[in-house]
Structures are given as C-alpha cells and as structure tokens.
Image (cartoon, grey):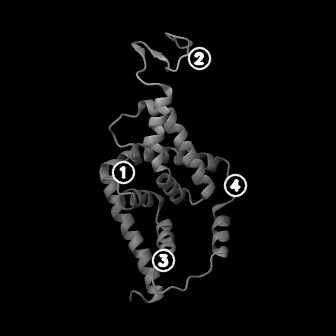
C-alpha cells in the first residue's frame, strides 16, 4: 500500500502524514538536525573503523554505510540520548556485517597484506615508544579485547555504553578490558625492552 497524504506530497514541504496528522518537522529540518548532531563524529568513527578493519578503503566503506544506516533510522533515535554511542553501535554492526561479506568473498589474504606492510615500513630507530608502535601493539591484541580498549580507554565511553555498543554484558566489557590492557602492556613492555627503555 502507498502512504496516505493530507496534501500533495510533491508540492508540500512537509513530510508524510502519520495517523495523527503531519509530522511536526519538515524533511529539510530533519536533515539539518542529522547533519548537526551526527556529522561532527565522522572523524572519530573513521579512526575506530580504521582500527577495526586495518584497511583505509574498508574503513571508509564502513563509515559511509554507518551514516547511511544512521540516516535511514534517524527517526528511531531518541532525542536527548547519546548520539555518539548510538553511531558507534551502528558502526560496530556495519563492520561486523561487512566482515561476513569479506569472508564470503575474500580478496587479498591477510598474510599478503601483512607482508606488504612489513616490506613498506623500515625498522624504527627510536629510543622511546612511538605512536606507530603503540598502535601496532594495539593491533596485536585479540579483536574482542581491542574493541573494548578502544571504546573505553581511547574513546572514553562508560562501561555501560560500551556494553550497549558491543551487545555484551557489562561484566564482559570489564573482563575484556582487563585482559586487553594486560595484553597491551605485555606487548609494549617487549617493545620498550628492545630499545633498552625497560630492563
């Protein structure tokens, strides 16, 4: 069935009619509201997607899909709640959906990508830990732990919101965070020892 309009939908600036009457905002106002509240988080979402996918193209696809899905379901977003947490939840769902697609239609194998990255980057000669080394150590920890560390320690989400984003209980977030921090600390200690920073 087609939706029923009180006025001609093509000539009216108002949206579709609900059973109770016109929606109390114009479509253009809703688009402006989405732009205002959701777009400021694009860089944060991209950084998270890049950490999760380890591929710039896939991260860009994930963020684009996130904003498309968020726009489609923006009418279900509750005003006054945390838009940032809601967008991260959509991002995690999009990345998990994309991973299932990538596994069905594999492209370049992970070992080939790792080989290309290793060949392209020279060995560091620093006497302290660099951002790249910290990120590499973060990439080495298991994915479930990495996601929690990124959400809680990097993006500073409370445990409850991280649990909602990941669809897991708060206790699981806390245990994964503890294990993730421990694994990250061990990897960074190994790197620091190699430079003689820690003995």
Considering only order in the chain, which callout, 2 or 4, is on the residue closer to the N terminus?
2
Considering only order in the chain, which callout, 1 or 3, is on the residue closer to the N terminus?
3
Considering only order in the chain, which callout, 1 or 4, is on the residue closer to the N terminus?
4
User: In terms of secondary structure, where does tag 3 sit?
Assistant: loop
Q: Which residue is mark 2?
A: 10
In-front residue for pair 180/84: 84
Separation (CA) of disc 4 from disc 1: 31 Å
User: In terms of secondary structure, where does tag 1 sit?
Assistant: helix
Q: Which residue is mark 4?
A: 107
The crowding category of the residue bearing disc 3, from other C-alpha atoms within 10 Å (few below 14, some 14 to 19, many at least 20), is few
The reply to whether dot 4 and dot 2 touch (C-beta < 8 Å) is: no
In-front residue for pair 127/139: 127
Q: Which residue is mark 3?
A: 130
Question: Is 176 on the left-hand or right-hand side of 92?
Answer: left
Across and down, in percent, residue 101 comes to 62, 45
Separation (CA) of disc 1 from disc 2: 42 Å
Q: Which residue is mark 1?
A: 162
Considering only order in the chain, which callout, 2 or 1, is on the residue closer to the N terminus?
2
Separation (CA) of disc 2 from disc 3: 57 Å
The reply to whether dot 3 and dot 1 touch (C-beta < 8 Å) is: no
User: In terms of secondary structure, where does tag 2 sit?
Assistant: loop
The reply to whether dot 2 and dot 3 touch (C-beta < 8 Å) is: no
Query: Which of the image's four quarters has the C terminus?
Result: bottom left
Q: Nearer the viewer, mark 4 or mark 2?
A: 2
Q: Is residue 108 above or below residue 188?
A: above
User: In terms of secondary structure, where does tag 4 sit?
Assistant: loop
Query: Which residue appears at 37% of the width and 67% of the height?
Result: 181
Question: Is 90 on the left-hand or right-hand side of 158?
Answer: right
Numbered mark located on residue 110 in the image? none
Q: Nearer the viewer, mark 4 or mark 1?
A: 1
């Amino acid at each position: 069935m087609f939706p029923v309009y009180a006025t001609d939908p093509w000539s009216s600036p108002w949206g579709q009619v609900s059973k109770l009457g016109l929606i109390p905002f114009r479509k253009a106002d809703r688009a402006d509201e989405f732009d205002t509240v959701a777009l400021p988080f694009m860089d944060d979402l991209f950084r998270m997607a890049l950490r999760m996918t380890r591929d710039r193209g896939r991260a860009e696809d994930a963020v684009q899909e996130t904003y498309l899905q968020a726009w489609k379901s923006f009418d279900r977003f509750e005003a006054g709640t945390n838009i940032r947490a809601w967008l991260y939840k959509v991002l995690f769902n999009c990345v998990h959906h994309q991973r299932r697609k990538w596994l069905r239609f594999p492209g370049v194998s992970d070992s080939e990508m790792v080989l290309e990255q290793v060949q392209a980057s020279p060995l560091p000669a620093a006497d302290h830990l660099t951002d790249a080394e910290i990120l590499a150590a973060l990439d080495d920890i298991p994915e479930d732990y990495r996601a929690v560390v990124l959400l809680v320690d990097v993006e500073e989400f409370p445990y409850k919101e991280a649990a909602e984003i990941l669809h897991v209980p708060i206790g699981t977030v806390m245990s994964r965070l503890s294990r993730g921090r421990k694994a990250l600390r061990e990897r960074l200690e190994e790197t620091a020892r190699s430079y003689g920073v820690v003995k």
